[in-house]
Image: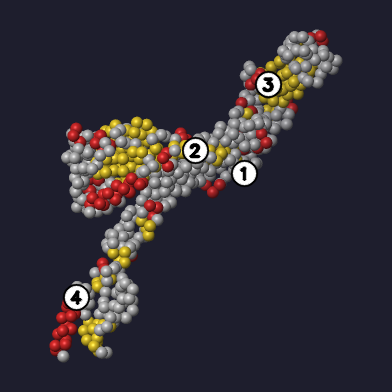
Amino acid sequence: MYSIFFLLIAVSLICITRTYENLALNKRTWQQYPYSEDWGADRAVDGRYTDMSAWGGQCTISGNEKSTAEWRVDLEEVLSLYNIVIHYRTDNYHWDESHEYTSRLLGFSVYISNTTSKEDGVLCFKESNYTRSTIPNPVNITCVQHGRYVIYYNNRTNPPFQTGYSTHAYNDLCEVEVYGCPILGFYGENCSTPCPVNCQGTNCDVIKETCLGGCASGYIGQMCTEECADNTYGQECMKVCSNCRDGEPCNHVNGSCPNDCERGTYGVECDIDISSNAYTNISLYYKAINVSGRGRIPLHWQMFYISNTTNKDDGTLCFKDTNFTVDTIPNTVNITCRTDGRYVTFFNNRTHPPYPIGYSSYAFADLCEVEVYGCPISGFYGENCSIPCPKNCQERYCDIVSGACRGCDVGYFGQKCDGLTECNNNTYGSKCSNVCQHCINAEQCDHVNGSCPNGCAKGTYGDKCDIACPSGLYGYNCQDNCSINCGVPERCDRVTGRCEAGCQIGWDPPKCDAECEGTFGDNCSNACGFCFDKEHCHPLNGTCINGCDSGYKGQQCTQVCNNSTFGPNCSMTCGNCLYLYGEQCHHVTGQCPRECIDGFTGARCLLLKEGRQYLYPVIYSSSAALGVIFLLVIIIIVK
């Protein structure tokens, strides 16, 4: 019987893993405490487990009386994994509650890592629900993950241990099969379908067309096919576009503006305020230039730049002559140029002949005087430069005539940044040009620094709530941990906590944070049978721990009593019912489906009758038939 049961398990495992390769076969292995060379770590990946005893030469065995046991296999490169099958040592005895080694297997864990350290990896499975009577062998673990090292670990380090646990930790692994795709970047049947092109690192679920580890910058969605929208860009679309011209959306990958920036901003992402770099020691009102020598007047293309560096290209073009002729250009040119800066640069060129009529052949300066008029102290404006610039002007710079601010301190706007109009509509910062991120309940963030006064919406954290929850965390301010019982342990939606790849067997979706109740199996999709006193069945395998309700039998209590039995544990025998179509009495009450056979009466046909007189109640069953006949003979003799 045991061999037949083992064969059925083996066939089912072959069906499960038929489209994936055993990636661990004959790969390099290691274990923490080898018992001896005869039971080396490599025995667990040699493809043999027909003799699962210590003397069969097919099992890894670790040292005795150790508090930890660790074994790993090196897949030689990072690969896409689907499931892991562990065949544990049995010494070729039937695997049940009485088997010594069930206690050794309890409490084990499996990690997937890109290094030889399990702490650097992901906990794929942690056994915490089985007992000595329920733990299966082999153990089939769904582990949709990417990694190079598969690490088996168990420990007995913190006594007292749970009921049924062994005192020490052991490996005792006869075979560890790791099924998945042999080439990274593919999934599906026969690992023949390429992962979506925008998966980060081309990593995708080995079964479904969903990306593991997130999307490449600029993309979102399970398959990473959706470009960032709603003026967002970057990793997980968590960044907000800045000041693109005419409100155009920025590039979904790098945030650059396709058709230049709004006035007053510059930079690849148009996120730098021009006035924020206008450090100056004088303010300009007008410039008077006395130029002598009409034949060498720098007609056309004369330009003046105001800059904070010695490079004109770092500054602002204040004036460019495009209208004067040789007859109209004045000797003293008066240019109004209200801006801030340190360097005033005159520039002319003769670089692209032929030149317009009246132009000299070469460029000259020939400047007799350049007068630059303005306020000698920054931060003042008006007549005699006696009026202080408004207090919320950025760097206290304002227009030398009107007093309008060149830019506002962070959190203010308006011509004079007078503080009467703090940023609103979910904006903050310089010129209220930054958009609040993910404050809870879409509240307005702080108008100066963008911080969220009452915390972040689900899925984000940080002062500005502009950082997505790290892997393994979700919810408000990322305070909740993804369940270790997720199909991919500790991997879930950062907003809702919904587990990736569903739940491990026996756990209730979508968060996999509670065991199945009234159901069992994969995603709690199977209904429990008729357990005793309406108790819940075992969440993993559906067995009824304290037996069945009256009228039912089997490990899962889904089978009704048969063979003319009914009641608790199907221990009672049906009465003397009349059966016409192969039916039997009611499996719970024992009531007959129609009348009794001749000579019996009552709801369950247990009462003998003679004429209309009820004589003796009897229990009539196949095992008591001779007793009934004997009783009838005695009655006849007495009469």
> Is there CB contact under 8 Å for labels 3 and 2?
no
- Please tell me whether mark 4 or mark 3 is closer to you in this view: 4
Q: CA distance from mark 4 to mark 3?
A: 117 Å
- Identify the element where label 4 is drawn: loop
Task: Look at mark 4 in the image and give the residue it sits on.
Answer: 624
Give the residue pinned by disc 1.
425
What's the distance in space between the residues labelled 2 and 1, CA to CA? 38 Å
> Residue, x 30% and y 74% (percent of image)?
585
Closer to viewer: mark 3 or mark 2: 2
Instruction: In the rendered structure, find residue 306 and report the number of the disc placed on it.
Output: 3
Residue 122 seen in the figure = no
**Disc 3 crowd, CA 10 A, few/some/many (<14, 14-19, 20+):** many
C-alpha span from label 1 to label 3: 35 Å
Location of residue 324 (image quadrant): top right
Residue where numbered disc 2 is placed: 196
Q: Amino acid at mark 2?
A: Pro
Residue type indicated by callout 1: Asn
Q: Amino acid at mark 3?
A: Ile
